[in-house]
Amino acid sequence: MRELTVRGIILGALITAIFTASNVYLGLKIGLTFASSIPAAVISMAVLRAAGGAGVLENNMVQTQASAAGTLSSIIFVLPALVMAGIWQGFAFWPVAIVCVAGGMLGVLFTIPLRRALVTGSDLPYPEGVAAAEVLRVGAGTDAADRATQRESAVSLVIGTVLSAVVALATGGFRLLADGLTLAMGSTGPVFRLTSGFSLALLGAGYLVGLAGGIAMLVGLVIAWGVLTPYLTALLPHPAGVAPAAFALDVWKHRVRFIGAGTIGIAALWTLGTLAGPVAAGLRDALRGGATVPILPPRHPEPANPDADRDLSPKLIGPLALVLVAVLFAAFLAFLPAPYTAGPIGVALLAALFCAVFGFVIAAACGYMAGIVGSSSSPISGIAILAVLSLSLLVSGLLDLGWLPGPAQVTRPLAVGLVIFVATAVLAAATISNDNLQDLKTGQLVGASPWKQQVALMIGCVSGAVVIPPVLNLLYNAYGFAGAMPHPGMDPEHALAAPQATLMASLASGVVLGSQDWTPIVQGVGLGALLIAVDLILRRAGARRHLRLPPLAVGIGLYLPPEVTVALVVGAIASAVIAHSLRHRPEAARNAAENRAVMLASGLIVGESLMGVVLAGIVGGSGRDDLLALVGPGFAPGATVLGAAVFCAVTLWFAFSVIRRGRA
């Protein structure tokens, strides 16, 4: 019956730190993060078993705490916009950590009153919560088959991590392998630029995305680089002395990418809108009768837990929520320059109240959406866009009222920064609430104590918030962000794309400063509307064949660098090949193969991401990005051949390894 133990908290903090660093790197590179609950559960079961054994409840607390790594790190979808907009020159520890902790803990508190309505007394599927519960149940088994499954999961995770880390070291450190290949065709008229990346982390992420999302991203890639970029390069004057590949890249960055931003924006809002009706109806019905719904019996091999239906006390929730809102008020006020007259104090107070009110509404909606489609598939980008647009309009109105006195050239850029900073807190609350109800569903299925899970997730918020600022600084100083390089002479080709943050900076600046060229964004909105219509037609025409073209994924394919999209698509195609090869196998065999694939894919992501952070530390400490290089620039052609060969070999090995396991 051990649950929230000291050793579990320490292990959960370590796993949270590792997965938070991995997710920050991955999110800045490709705009996606991975769910950390299941890999954390596997690690916890392996480590605690080696330390003398652990029950399902203790392992559940570790994965609950570590799940914050996959969710709180989503604030990098907004926060780097402060650097991109020129408001910050880096990431100070205390402002970032405070807004992450306070926003994340508010997200936990907001969902506590909704637990009985949305989890215990609801028939929402909570796909990721149920999957995590199944993993924990297998981990609690003591027969030979369960032990074999536990060992296989842990070994697969380790193999994927080590393999990916070694390849990343050979690529980014030793320079023996290239990280991609670029070809350009056409010197006058339309320019076609073909690019492919060789990232194993993207291969793993593509497998987890699946075929529908991968094909949609491929469609976005074809539209961006097969239609829009060649058309615009033929239409626009070609600058003298600029190589065709560089000209095509410049057109994509300054025109096509903003079309992708408009597509992402309308698609995210459409996804949010399609869920608004079910969310509102479900919340209304659940809150009316949720308290009288009988508690579902916990399914676990241990004795019944007497705290299986106990939340944190309301006597604690209310005061703690007030303290957290007060902390946010202080953080927002400190963001503004002194003297703190009535105007800045009023702005900071309204911002804190916005986080409390808007945050609670969004927390309820996100919790319900997590129950429908899962945490990873929830349209968090749409939440961020809504928050940024709402705050931009609010702050613009306060500026017009003179609540932020001073010259316009100072106060308006500062107002852009305040919008982004406050939106970071809202997003932290939204993502954690998204995760909390998923964890509580896992806890319900294994008979855990809700109040202890809520405490564990708050501890996870603290663990993640401590890691995020130094990792952000490390990555920014080593690689830079798209359009924001910290040092002169840095290679923009190696900059981290930070796609969502770029969009948020453009939205906030466009509304508050009125400086955004909205033409490509409006064009993207029109393209997104067309894609939404195509998706609806495909769904109706091919309902039985599950035909889909998710417009949000198409927008991401337009927006992301092509070297990212191609590797993701390869992973998605690998997932389809594996599923097709095993379609006639028994369910148990397919489950075993899927377990191996998920663990290997997670390992590929974690290994490369962690090595990226390590290499960033070496670059930042030495001031050189070639300190570990074993070869010079002349080896580039050979590195390209070797990089492509290694990527293809690992892809084939990944697919055949999973298929062989399913046929064993």
Image (cartoon, grey):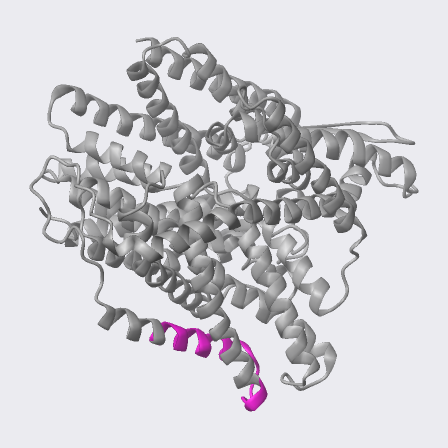
44 and 216: which is toward the camera: 216
Residue closer to the observer: 392 or 201 = 392
Tell me if residue 427 comes above or below residue 609 in the rendering: below
Q: Main secondary structure of the magenta part?
A: helix
Q: Residue at x 85, y 40 (%)?
A: 242
Question: Is residue 288 on the magenta stretch?
Answer: no
Q: Position of residue 478 (x, y in %)?
A: 55, 51
Q: Residue drawn 37% across and 60% down?
A: 466
- Does the magenta segment cover residue 339? yes
Q: Position of residue 310 (x, y in %)?
A: 18, 57
In the visual, does 463 lie left or right of 265?
Answer: left
Image position of 273 (left or right of 255): left
Residue 643 lies, with reference to residue 625, above or below; the image says above
Residue sticking out furthest to the left: 303
In which quadrant is the C terminus drawn?
Answer: top left
- Residue 342's x, y, as percent? 55, 90
Query: Is residue 496 something that shows in the picture?
Result: no
Residue 153 picture quarter: top left
Start and end of the magenta stretch?
A: 323-343
Q: Residue at x 67, y 84 (%)?
A: 401
**Is residue 323 shown above or below 38?**
below
Compared across the picture, whether 113 is left or right of 356 comes to left
Between 159 and 99, the one lying in front of the other is: 99
**Seen in the image, is 7 located left or right of residue 600?**
left
363 or 381, which is in the foreground?
Answer: 363
Residue plotted at (29% across, 44% down) = 441
Measured as percent of width and height from the top left, residue 385 is found at 60, 56
